[in-house]
Amino acid sequence: MTEDIERLRSALRDDARMLFNTEEGDRLLEDMKRRYGMYSPTFSGDPHETSYREGQRSVVLYVMSLLRDEPTQGDDSG
């Protein structure tokens, strides 16, 4: 089972690199960073809105971690 998980992680990282390491992918990632809170605070007076914004931001962080080949939250390897 662990071998299958490692293979899937490796495939996802390869896929992310193939998609985002292009001019179009770079443009898309930069738009996602701007749109989903990488360059601005996600805090709001409404805790639900803050949680929503942090959820959006976490997707961008996940993509960026794939591109850097870093473990992601939820990985069994820690």
Image: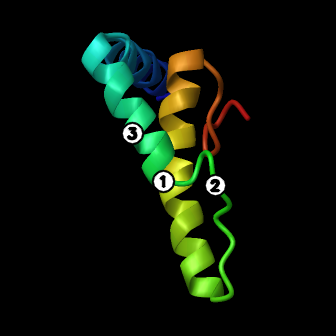
- The residue tagged 1 is 36
Amino acid bearing label 1? Tyr
Q: Name the element at disc 3.
A: helix
> First in sequence: mark 3 or mark 1?
3
Which of the 4 image quadrants contains residue 19?
top left
Residue ID at (31%, 10%): 22
Report if the CB atoms under discs 1 and 2 are less than 8 Å apart.
Answer: no
Location of the C terminus (image quadrant): top right
- Residue 46: x, y in percent? 63, 89
- In the image, taking residue 12 as reference, residue 55 lies left or right, namely right
On residue 31, the disc is: 3
Q: Is residue 63 above or below residue 59?
A: above
Report if the CB atoms under discs 3 and 2 are less than 8 Å apart.
Answer: no
Which of the 4 image quadrants contains residue 11?
top left
> What's the distance in space between the residues labelled 1 and 2, CA to CA?
8 Å
**Label 1 packing within 10 angstroms: few (<14), some (14-19), many (20+):** many
Residue ID at (54%, 66%): 53
- Residue 52: x, y in percent? 51, 72
Q: Name the element at disc 2.
A: loop
Q: Is residue 23 above or below residue 40?
A: above
**Label 2 packing within 10 angstroms: few (<14), some (14-19), many (20+):** few
> What's the distance in space between the residues labelled 3 and 1, CA to CA?
8 Å
